[in-house]
């Protein structure tokens, strides 16, 4: 299991902290390095354009710093690409601290999960915070999330139809033309089945 730490709100609750502490490898976006240091965590890789890292920190972590000046992608995407290319045996990536400090960064980072799902279908990538777990779907699936858990579904594809089983409010007739349309639902069963009418992209947020 591999974790990527972004420069959002650093996790305080048990579950995301456990993921971080038990990771086989930690890749740190450069802006998050000082926060990791503050918590006594040493990453395995620091990546980014390095505009957010002081020279003294670069000296301390010189051997694990990867400079990537590509301005067409953000540091989180650089970290995901680095992980996929350099750790081919890893099948699961948890992204931590990617939300919470900036609404714009939060929306942008969360939406990137759909891009990652397209680019790296061999990887299970989720985004975990103190409040939720977020992941992307590209096709029908059954989610074993537990009865009573709150679930929201978002999609940028208004042609997508999602037939649901195990939800309090069925999504069969939802038109995904705005973000609120299938949000704040509740699982009425341990397993929730979401059946897409065609392959597409959707985000699932579990609270």
Image (cartoon, grey):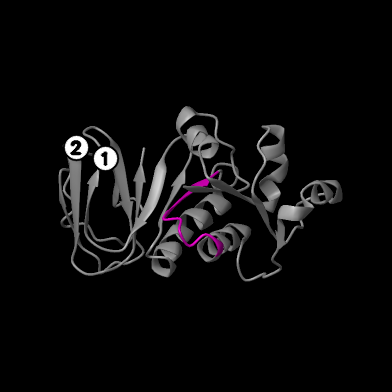
| Other-residue count near label 2 (Cα within 10 Å), few / some / many at <14 / 14–19 / ≥20 | some
Mark with earlier residue (2, 1): 1
Split into 4 quadrants, where in the image is the C terminus? top left
Q: Position of residue 87 (x, y in %)?
A: 52, 59
Residue corresponding to mark 2: 190
Q: Is residue 88 above or below residue 147?
A: below
Mark 2 secondary-structure assignment: loop
Q: Is residue 203 left or right of residue 196?
A: right
**Residue 193 among magenta residues:** no
Q: Residue at x 85, y 51 (%)?
A: 55
Q: Is residue 127 visible?
A: yes
Which label was assigned to residue 13?
none
Q: Are marks 2 and 1 in contact (CB under 8 Å)?
A: yes
Q: Is residue 157 above or below residue 7?
A: below
Q: Is residue 71 left or right of residue 62?
A: left
Q: Position of residue 30 (x, y in %)?
A: 69, 52
The residue nearer to you, when weighing 16 against 160, is 16
Q: Which range is magenta?
A: 86-96
**Residue 95 among magenta residues:** yes
Q: Residue at x 19, y 45 (%)?
A: 192
The residue nearer to you, when weighing 169 against 86, is 86
Q: Is residue 103 left or right of residue 177?
A: right
Q: Position of residue 151 (x, y in %)?
A: 30, 42
Q: Position of residue 187 (x, y in %)?
A: 21, 38
Mark 1 secondary-structure assignment: loop
Q: Residue at x 52, y 57 (%)?
A: 108
Direction front: furthest residue: 89
The residue nearer to you, when weighing 205 against 43, is 43
Q: Is residue 196 above or below residue 180?
A: below
Distance from Cα at disc 2 to Cα at disc 1: 6 Å
Residue corresponding to mark 1: 145
| Other-residue count near label 1 (Cα within 10 Å), few / some / many at <14 / 14–19 / ≥20 | some
């Amino acid at each position: 299991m591999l974790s990527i730490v972004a420069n959002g709100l650093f996790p305080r609750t048990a579950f995301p902290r456990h993921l971080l502490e038990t990771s086989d490898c930690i890749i740190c976006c450069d802006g998050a390095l000082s926060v990791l240091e503050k918590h006594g965590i040493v990453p395995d890789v620091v990546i980014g354009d390095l505009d957010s890292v002081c020279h003294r920190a670069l000296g301390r972590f010189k051997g694990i710093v990867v400079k990537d000046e590509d301005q067409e992608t953000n540091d989180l995407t650089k970290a995901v690409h680095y992980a996929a290319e350099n750790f081919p045996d890893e099948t699961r990536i948890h992204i931590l601290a990617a939300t919470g400090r900036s609404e714009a960064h939060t929306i942008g980072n969360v939406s990137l999960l759909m891009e990652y799902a397209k680019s790296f279908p061999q990887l299970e990538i989720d985004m975990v915070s103190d409040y939720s777990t977020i992941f992307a779907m590209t096709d029908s699936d059954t989610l074993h999330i537990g009865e009573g858990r709150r679930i929201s579904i978002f999609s940028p594809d208004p042609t997508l139809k999602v037939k649901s089983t195990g939800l309090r409010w069925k999504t069969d007739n939802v038109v995904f033309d705005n973000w609120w349309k299938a949000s704040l639902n509740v699982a009425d069963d341990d397993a929730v089945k979401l059946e897409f009418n065609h392959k597409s992209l959707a985000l699932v947020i579990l609270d």
